[in-house]
Image (cartoon, rainbow, N blue to C red):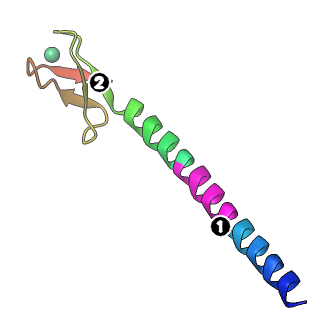
Amino acid sequence: MISIDFSIAIACFFIIIINILLISWIRGKRHKDKDLALDTKFVWFCAICAYTYINTKDENISICPRCGSYNKK
Ligand SMILES: [Zn+2]
C-alpha cells in the first residue's frame, strides 16, 4: 500500500516537472519569436550608403550611423 502510494507520488512529481519544463519552453520560444519580430521592425536600410542598421528609438525618420544621412521608413 505504501509502495503504491509512493510510486504514484513519484509519477505525479515527474508529470508536474515535465509540464513545468514544457510550459516554460513554449513560453520561451514564443518570447523569442516576439523579440525577433520586434527586431525586424526596427531594421533600417540607408538609401545613400546601402548600410543596414537597427534603430529602436525613432519610428519615421532615423539618422544613418555610417554616413549621417536621414532615412525615411
Ligand atoms: Zn548611410
Residue at the spot 16% in from the left edge and 9% down from the top edge: 49
Q: What is the residue that sits farthest to the left in this orientation?
A: 67
Q: Is residue 33 magenta?
A: no
Residue 17 bears which disc, if any?
1
**x, y percentage for residue 47?**
23, 11
Q: Is residue 30 above or below residue 40?
A: below
Residue range corresponding to the magenta coloring: 17-28
Residue 44 bears which disc, if any?
2
The quarter of the picture where the N terminus appears is bottom right
Q: Is residue 24 above or below residue 6?
A: above
In-image side of 50 versus 24 (left or right)? left
In-image side of 12 versus 29 (left or right)? right
Residue at the spot 85% in from the left edge and 90% down from the top edge: 2
Q: Callout 2, which amino acid?
A: Trp
Which image quadrant for residue 6? bottom right
**x, y percentage for residue 67?**
8, 17
